[in-house]
Amino acid sequence: MLEKEKSNNNNKRRLEERSKSLEQFFIQKTSEYPELDSSDLLKKFEDQNKQCCFCKTQLECPKLDITLKKGENRYHINYNQPSLDRIDNFNKLHSIDNINITCWMCNYMRGSSGIELFQMIIDILIGKGDTLDLSNMDFRQTLIASYNNDGKRWNVPPEIVRKQITADNITSLKCPISDFPLFLGKEDRHLLYPSYDRIINNDSEGNKLNHNIHNIQLVASFMNLARNSINTLNDFKVIFNAKFPNRTKNIKVIYPVDYKWVLKGKNVMTENRFKEEQEKEKVKKREKMKKHILDKILKKEKQKNMFSPFNKLKKNVKYPHKKLREKFQKIVSQVIRDLRNLKSIKEWQNKHNSIPGYKQVSREELNLYEILSKLKAKKIYNTLLKNISGCVVKQQKDINNELWKSQWLRVFKKESMTKDLLNWIRTQRKHWEKNKLSKEQILQCEKIPGWWWTEIHQGYNRNKGWFESNPKKLPNKTKHSTEYNWFYKIRKMYIADNLSHFEINLVKNISIFELWLTNGKPLSKKDEFYKEFDNKYKYN
């Protein structure tokens, strides 16, 4: 309990520090993401004029609110606080080259989507553009009333979906809050996909309300994300209108040429019918593949003038390696695409005399930057990437591993404990608690003299010598006060169920602790077996 209180006090202190200084906010972020350096973060923040890189809003210190109700967080007062948004969401690292400093709302609003569509949306929201070009985007030509675009079931009954989304209104559906069109994008979690948002999230007591017909509104997916935990839709409208007062309201939308339904007069398919259609498509593809392979065999046989044996073979031909062949074809196609992308990156380098970067100079550069990150991750193209002038082949993950090893070596050699080394030690303990360290890193840390993971572990390292010398003796309160206090503490925590699995296994190495467990676990003089246990094992 004392440890929890201490942790809560530390969290409160950190929140108070953040609320007074944006610099403190970024310094604390480096302990959360060890791959970042606070000086690099602050420089990037200054380069952005202390604004959100998307909506250009002036970023603010996080505000504290001690009057939070059940189910609320501080988002409704802190949507303009700084946030670290990854440029390439496939790259899980928050490296300085893979982040933008944004406001909290823009980070939530973008979700896991790509930069290109989100940038178009932002340009319209800040009044910089008036055209939404969807002409090159893939879309769903059928809609299953039971499922949304994440492959999960809608929170509302299918009959409501069928009634509100029809073939007649598919190009006129609009989000009532933002005036953006609702678009059936094929990409998972598409920002413009129809989404049912509750009008009120929680009642006055903080209990979650359901998605019933009287408590839902059809909005664009990115608006549902932007609202986050703001309780009422009206409150969110006020905040959204104040944040984007100059947004374009008459948006010009360019839809794909063939944006229409495949089934005539039937805009929504049932779940069973959808599965039937999918099965038909699979059968057609299999037949087409068989015919294609047979034609190839026929062509080869024709060249060899072996028609008669082939005619007998044709009726019973089988394809035992079909899956393997399909997999090989996919790999070859991907390699061809990768080589084309490499060529595009090289052409960019020759034209601009630099490697594509994360800064938003143009959408083309951002796309090439994301492609370059993926090629580096595959590692098989390292030799080709080295031939591109100025291209660093080493991945951020490898750089972070090298940095980790160098920090470990400094701690192992017992160099003077600077602030960055103390932060590194704290970070390793946090990562250990959350199972974020690899087995190799755990073993390396435990090689450091005097290393401990928890306070109980630290006490075990300090006191185990005495308990090994006196295996079946209780420490005397007067003569061995340190050992006595620590032993009393672990017994008290064990009874209160506050010891972790790791700590329990650790203290079970102490023989007197094992004897205490088997003798009724007496702790105070009021306990039944206390006198008997104390007389039997007390230190003389």
Image: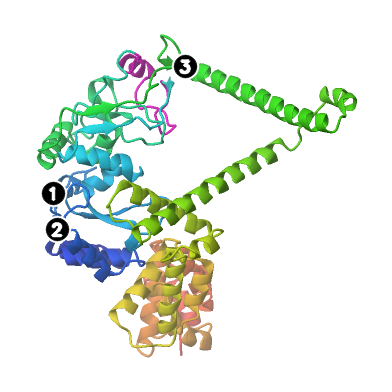
- Residue 430 location, x and y as percent? 37, 66
Badge 2 is on which residue? 61
Residue 472 is at least partly visible in this image:
yes
Q: Earlier in the sequence, mark 2 or mark 1?
A: 2
Contact flag, marks 2 and 3 (Cβ < 8 Å) = no
Badge 3 is on which residue? 270
Q: CA distance from mark 2 to mark 3?
A: 50 Å
- Residue 494 location, x and y as percent? 42, 66
Amino acid type of the residue that numbered disc 2 sits on in the rendered structure: Cys
Residue 13 is at least partly visible in this image:
no
- Dot 1 falls on a residue whose secondary structure is loop
- Residue 390 location, x and y as percent? 41, 66
Q: Residues within 10 Å of mark 2 (few under 14, many from 20)?
A: some
Residue pictured at 26% horizontal, 27% vertical: 253
Task: Choose mark 2 or mark 1, whichever is in front.
Answer: 2
Left or right relative to 365: residue 70: left
Foreground residue, 540 or 501? 501
Amino acid type of the residue that numbered disc 3 sits on in the rendered structure: Thr
- Magenta residues span 145-167
Asked if residue 248 lies in the magenta stretch, the reply is no
Badge 1 is on which residue? 67
